[in-house]
Image (cartoon, grey):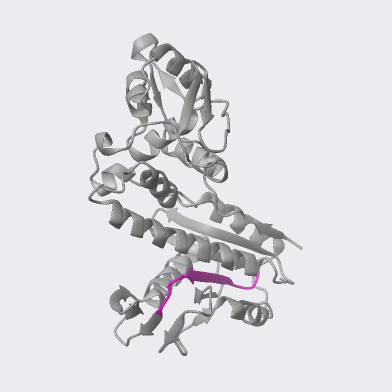
Amino acid sequence: MIFIQLNRDIPAGLFSLRRLHRRLSVNHPQFTDINQDLYNSNAGHAGEAYIDSVLSTIHFPIPHILLPNIRIHEKDIPSTQIDILIFTTAYALIIEVKNWSGTISFQQVGQVLQTKDGIVRSMDCPTVQADYYVGNLLDWFAKHDTQLPVHRIVSFPFASTLLIGAENRGIHFAKELPIILRKLNKLPQQLTHYQFQTLSKKLQESNRPFEHATACQKYGIHPSELLKGIFCPKCESRLLKKSNRVYVCSSCLHTPDNPFYDTMIDWFTLVGNQITNRQLRLFAGVDKSYSVGYFMKKSNFPYSGQNKGTIYHVNAEEMHRFLSKKEKACFRE
């Protein structure tokens, strides 16, 4: 039996939103909007993680791979971002996760109305999006000389959401997944183990993280509007300087090995992909260039130049790597 389940990383957009949120004053004119965006992104990620936990309890009698948050990017195939893709020797299943609350009413014109706290919002119908992804995935399989049934569902994690007009649209609550997958797992197998392994590898190779604009670029915020300082990677309180090379959290008393590492990640995520000693000092609110230089070198980020001309930088691949590496250490779920 072949079984592969990849871990779900916190999306880069959510990662940067969390960092932007902590570096904005509550009096900033965009704080309310960003706070709402952060709430929505956190809810979406929590919903996907909950679906992951439900899937982890389901028995698959056939070879399968679970691919969370996969972005299929390949020549001649439209870029396709899928919340959860289940790929087996018998079928592929696209799960579009919507952690929406309130009352959700599905209209006949590809539109959804959400009623919450007396406010009605109009949104795109997730079934249309999921159907589009089905077509793209079928094209991807055809490009790789494979014919495989592709199914899709839109899944709401929690039954506290009231759904209206969702019947016969492939819309289900998470608790229905075991029944749905039990039926799908009885479908005739289409692929040999070798074909399955080969295509699994190709799917993972075609997964390309989206290159997001920095948070400041997205929201039109100038770096000078961000709060200065060094934040604790454990609890997000401010670090206090104890000596030239020792900083202690004012709240949890954590003493990080490299207090400037997380601050550099803030800069790379929010402002740009390169930083100098002077920029980091201004951003962190410190004035000693030699101690900052020591920690910048200790960070092991790539750099070019020397002495005062040293510039530390990261590319898109390095950004993705340290985002997924640092996410759990930097923020509590």
174 over 252 or under it: above or below? below
- Relative to the observer, which residue lies in front, 166 or 204? 166
| Viewer-side residue, 239 vs 210 | 239
Q: Residue at x 51, y 38 (%)?
A: 322
> Relative to residue 17, is residue 234 drawn left or right?
right
68 or 251: nearer the viewer: 251
The residue sitting at the top extreme is 307
Q: Residue at x 49, y 15 (%)?
A: 244
Q: Give percent across and percent down for residue 259.
A: 50, 27
Vertical placement of 77 versus 239: above or below? below
Chain part drawn in magenta:
88-102
Q: Is residue 243 magenta?
A: no
Q: Does 291 appear above or below 76?
A: above
Residue 206 spot, x, y in % from top left: 50, 52
Residue 221 in view here: yes
89 drawn magenta: yes
- 62 or 162, which is in the foreground? 162
Quarter where residue 281 is shown: top left
Give the total number of marks visible in the rendering. 0
> Can see residue 260?
no
Residue, x 57% and y 70% (percent of image)?
Answer: 92
Q: Residue at x 35, y 55 (%)?
A: 35
Extreme right residue here?
Answer: 1
Q: Residue 5: x, y in percent?
A: 65, 58
Q: Is residue 78 left or right of residue 42?
A: left
Q: Which quadrant of the figure contains the N terminus?
A: bottom right
